[in-house]
Image (spheres, rainbow, N blue to C red):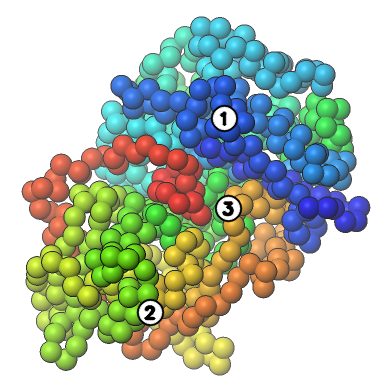
Amino acid sequence: MASGGRGPLYIGFDLSTQQLKALVVDSNLKLRHEAKVSFDDDLSHYGIQKGVLTNPSEGEIYAPVAMWLEAIELVLSRLRDVGCDFSQIKGLSGAGMQHGTVFWSREAEKLLAGLDSSKTLKDQLEPSTKVSERLGAFSHPDSPNWQDASTQKQCDAFDAELGSPQELANETGSKAHHRFSGPQIMRWREKYPHEWKNTSRISLVSSFISSIFLGKFAPIDIGDVCGMNLWHIDQGRWHEQLLQLAAGGQDVSDLKAKLGEVLEDGGAHFGSISSYFVKRFGFPSDCTIIPCTGDNPATILALPLRPSDAMVSLGTSTTFLMSTPTYKPDPSYHFMNHPTTAGLYMFMLCYKNGGLAREQIRDNLDSSKSWDKFNSTALSTPPLAETDSSPARLGLYFPRPEIVPNIHAGQWRYTYNSKSDNLRPISSDPTDADARNIVESQMLSLRLRSQGLVHPQKTADGKELPAQPRRVYLVGGASSNPAIARIAGDVLGGAEGVFKLDIGGNACALGAAYKAAWGIERQSKQSFEDFIGGRWDEDKFVVRITDGYREGVFEKYGAALKGFERMENEVLGTDENAKVQLTGGKRRHGARDSVIADDIYLGA
């Protein structure tokens, strides 16, 4: 895109599993330039597939840090090629795939401070990608990826350390997961004792980006730190007991020094950009580095979500995000600090079964794979398929093993009478009612797990409404389906309605660019939400597609929640399901997917 005017510009990066994106916006948040680097297409000489290397025998999935260094220079070159004037960039931030770790050597900060602008980042910081040849800024050449599943032993230890997965979630926002940085660091220290001794700092992917552009080690972001199982969210500090566990029972001071500080202000000024980028690319010397955050926290900044708003990503998987002042952790979902606003939290639910489950029902109804029959059947079926002569129908539809709740693949159908609380299993044979029930099932699970986070709302004329989201935003491939949108509103509510959000695949980079603009231009004590709300062009990205709350219908689904929870618990208690009850979740292998992506998130 051609630029217009000479006002300040802000750049946001998104370093994900398969690519590096960069977006440039102006003070009015208008997109001015964009560029990307695809690792498989542009940097295939690293031998990666879908952005990663694998060691299947140990369940390891990782990426070479040198590849990211090359990608940073390449994406900046591509921005310059499309006309970006780096001399106008006043602020920089980024988003990194969550949970990944980068291990810096003892020579790293000296190398970062002394970069020669006539040479590449890779040649100076990572001249060799071999573990045995550590000559540069990293004590190990690779960064564990969120898909890594090598830490079952460490996850068991983390879940047991505080007495239960529930207590771990209470204090750190999540139970132990394979991808979380704490279990990863614990295993890495055990596997690489020599490299551990040569490690001076451990960055998350987000703080790695900050450090490269800052020319020195940058603190970890207040939102991204919650994806480690090492941060005591309620007390706002490193969790000493869990640090000691990760450190192998040794004194925690060494690990704490390796992790560094965490700043609470998401808009803090880390300092000016490294002179390397001033001389090599023409950035102004006063370009300021604003904390980079995780890709999922960055996504909620791209909307931006207001407290009590809900966002549902309807891709191959289903992901549910809320910004909320209420902290009610549970092992089945995630809580993280909001990346910009103290006192708010990011609530996140991730499901493996989404679009695939809906498509399975669609194909049972119509072998042509058209959505027309599915939609007409779903909308002509009464809520819960309940009539005067037949009770409500409930079901679980899992083509893949599910993680919320942790249930093996299969289908289960029940009837439920909310007045008598009578729940009864019925035949699992497909019926036409499945078209509505599959969508209801997915939305009831979201409502069940988020009901303690929503508050009563009011209509425009002041009428009091039951507790529900203010707005429900739908994103992803199925957000254009009118039947799915209508049923989502029936179950979840939405005092102001159900909206379709279209920000393409650039949510993370866009949120990072907005964060940079807010960090530089905010007034004293001006919140991110107020800053962005005054400049964000909602009409460009958001369309109201249907009503949310419908009186009587919303309450009917509320009465069914008890039966839905009982149904889940009955299926969880079956003998054949016992085999999937594993701490840390199941091993997963696949491409990167954040909350706007097409596959299961669980990490970035």
Q: Residues within 10 Å of mark 3 (few under 14, many from 20)?
A: few
Is residue 417 shown left or right of residue 49?
A: left
Please state the horizontal and vertical placement of residue 427, each as a whole percent of the image: 9, 68
**Is 5 drawn above or below residue 368 in the view shown?**
above
- Whether residue 106 appears in this view of the structure is no
Q: Which residue is mark 2?
A: 490
**Is 115 drawn above or below residue 457 in the view shown?**
above
Report how far apart the C-alphas of labels 1 and 2 lie in the structure. Answer: 44 Å
Amino acid identity at mark 2: Asp
- Of discs 1 and 3, which sits in the foreground? 3
Report how far apart the C-alphas of labels 1 and 3 lie in the structure. Answer: 26 Å
Residue at figure coordinates x 39%, y 32% from the top left: 148
**Is 69 drawn above or below residue 190 in the view shown?**
below
Residue at figure coordinates x 47%, y 46% from the top left: 593
Is residue 129 shown left or right of residue 443?
A: right
- Of discs 2 and 3, which sits in the foreground? 3
Please state the horizontal and vertical placement of residue 345, each as a whole percent of the image: 50, 56
Secondary structure category for the residue under label 3: loop
Secondary structure category for the residue under label 2: helix
Amino acid identity at mark 3: Gly
Amino acid identity at mark 1: Ser
Is residue 109 shown left or right of residue 460?
A: right
Mark positioned earlier in the residue sequence (1 or 3): 1
Mark positioned earlier in the residue sequence (1 or 2): 1
Residue at figure coordinates x 90%, y 56% from the top left: 5
**Is 355 drawn above or below residue 281 in the view shown?**
below
Is residue 210 shown left or right of residue 148?
A: right
Please state the horizontal and vertical placement of residue 154, each as a whole percent of the image: 32, 29
Disc number at residue 505? 3
Please state the horizontal and vertical placement of residue 202, each as a whole percent of the image: 55, 26
